[in-house]
Image (cartoon, rainbow, N blue to C red):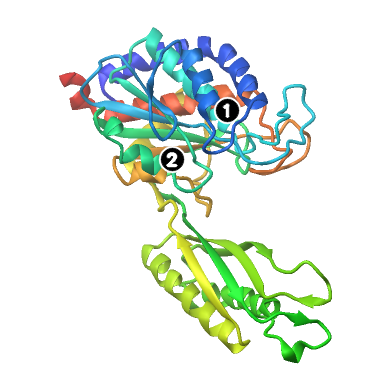
Amino acid sequence: MTDTVVQSAGALFAALEQEIPDAERLRRQLHAEPRISGDEGDTTTALLDALGVAGQRLGFGGALVRFEAPDGPAVGVRAELDALPVAEATGVAWRSRNAAMHACGHDVHMAAAVALARSLRAVPGPLPLLLVLQPREETLPSGARDVVTSEEFAAHDVRAMVGAHVQPTLEPGTFAATGGPVNAAADQFTIEVHGHGGHAAYPHLTADPVVASANLIGTFQHLISRQVNPVHPTVLTVGSINGGKSANVVPSTVRMRGILRTFDERDRVRLHHAIEETTRAVTNIHGCDASVEMSLGAPVLKNDQALATVATQMIERAGMTSAPPLRSCGADDFSFFCARVPSLMVFVGVESITGSDPGLHRPDFLPPDEAVGQVARALLGGYLAACQTLAPLAVAG
């Protein structure tokens, strides 16, 4: 660890602790007033107000805020702005009442990122910080992809990116900074099966898209079990299916939506073709036809090994415990940053204060306020790791 980074670490972690109480209050404010993907303007304003800066608003939503030197190499830290269209069921006084909810911990992430930025303003770090307030993490088109391809982001010469995410599968107070692939690529698909509707008493006079769709969903699972190497994590899920409104009428159309999650790019490409070919073959057997629309989502999220190693050391210095390596078929568009520059996503263990054992995206998922400080320490550890990895740049700056 370079002397510059070592000297900065103690002072920065001390400054961060001073910012955490205000960040916990900000977290509750953000949690009570969530905004869904594409409607994050109020959330952006709240964060800029908390930082006391105007920021650089982006035309597609969100903002960039740079601290310290206005030019030269910088380390980026991402905070996601959007909530999910979920009705909250936590019962706390500061719960959301607007049919949206921060059920994925983005309120915690944002408050933690503000605490980090404020601490770096109080105690300047080895390299400038670019705080990326990113819209639309939960939906397509990806907000991260818009950021990394923007002229505004390119102008800041970001050499490394850091993010953190609460993770209820880890023990509270622990973290996982795992090198290599840690999250899957995730691509959505929409399929419409078109048949010939009619009276349920005369099925021979119809081409039933419901039966065709049921067979298609079952057949999809064989694509995974028989066409993918079993040591390659792969998940194909149909999460929505709609067709018909009456029990005694065969509908003309069934529409389904699903998601494909892969860790291997060759599997990803092959399964795209297999979904389309299987859909045509199965529906044709039932006298139906179909259309398939594939929407590319986030690629595989690959953590930089050097950042992961040094960040683990730094976060442990802050009193947190390293957990075993964590990889999952979850997806996060932070992977678009990983594809551009060395990047690190740190997972931070949390529990829910609701007394149940809910996971992410559940209406009763609510990490405690203490999670804000834990995520902030993880972000600072990642920032310092990036500064050490980019040490020659820090000296030049």
Residue on which disc 2 sits: 143
Q: Is residue 271 above or below residue 78?
A: below
Compare residues 373 and 148 and report the one nearer the observer. Answer: 148
* Amino acid type for the residue under numbered disc 2: Gly
Residue 145 in view:
yes
- For badge 1, the amino acid type reads Val
- Secondary structure at badge 2 equals helix
In the image: residue 72, left or right of residue 358: left
Q: Which mark is residue 108?
A: 1
Viewer-side residue, 299 vs 379: 299
Residue at 18% from the left image edge and 26% from the top image edge: 392
Q: Nearer the viewer, residue 179 or 268?
A: 268
Residue at 65 percent across and 72 percent down: it is 253
Residue 10 image offset from top left, x and y in percent: 40, 14
Tell which tag, 2 or 1, sits nearer the viewer.
2
- Residue found 69% across the figure and 81% down from its top: 208
Q: Looking at this view, is 220 or 191 the one in front? A: 191
**CA distance for labels 2 and 1:** 19 Å
- On screen, 227 above or below 202? above
The residue at the point 65 percent across, 21 percent down is 28
Residue 142 location (% of width, % of height): 44, 45
The quadrant of the image that shows the N terminus is: top left
For the question of whether residue 314 can be seen, the reply is no
Numbered disc 1: secondary structure: helix
Relative height, residue 232 to residue 96 (above, below): below
